Amino acid sequence: MRRAGYQVVYYPDATIVHHEQRVTRRRLLTRLTFEHLKAMGLFFWKYPSGLWGKYL
């Protein structure tokens, strides 16, 4: 975000709800499904232990 020119701020009261399966329930193979799987792959390539690595 910073590289794109945006200012990054911390807002502790913010809530984010991620509905990752919302669109992919209707059709299995869509462009959005492909982009989602690609992003997941990049995340796990960058962080091989995933979200729980620091707790295991």
Image (cartoon, rainbow, N blue to C red):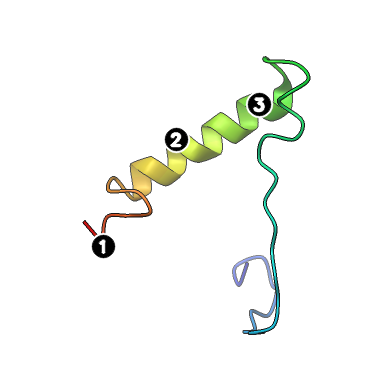
Badge 1 element: loop
Question: Residue 36, how many percent across, how many down?
Answer: 61, 34
* Tag 1 residue: 54
**Residues under numbered marks 2 and 1 in contact, where contact means CB atoms less than 8 Å apart:** no
**Residues under numbered marks 3 and 2 in contact, where contact means CB atoms less than 8 Å apart:** no
* Tag 3 residue: 33
Instruction: Please tell me which residue is depicted at 66% across the width and 40% down the height of the picture.
Output: 20
Q: Going from the N terminus, do you reach mark 2 or mark 1 first?
A: 2
Instruction: Please tell me which residue is depicted at 36% across the width and 48% down the height of the picture.
Output: 46
Marker disc for residue 41:
2
Amino acid type indicated by mark 3: Thr
Amino acid type indicated by mark 1: Lys
Q: CA distance from mark 3 to mark 2?
A: 12 Å
Q: CA distance from mark 1 to mark 3?
A: 28 Å
Marker disc for residue 5:
none
Horizontally, residue 40 falls left or right of residue 9, namely left
Counting labels gives 3
| 11, 19: nearer the viewer | 19
Amino acid type indicated by mark 2: Gly
Position of 1 relative to 48 (above/below):
below
Badge 3 element: helix
User: If the image is split into quadrants, where does the N terminus sit?
Assistant: bottom right
Q: Going from the N terminus, do you reach mark 1 or mark 3 first?
A: 3
Mark 2 or 1: the one toward you: 1
Badge 2 element: helix
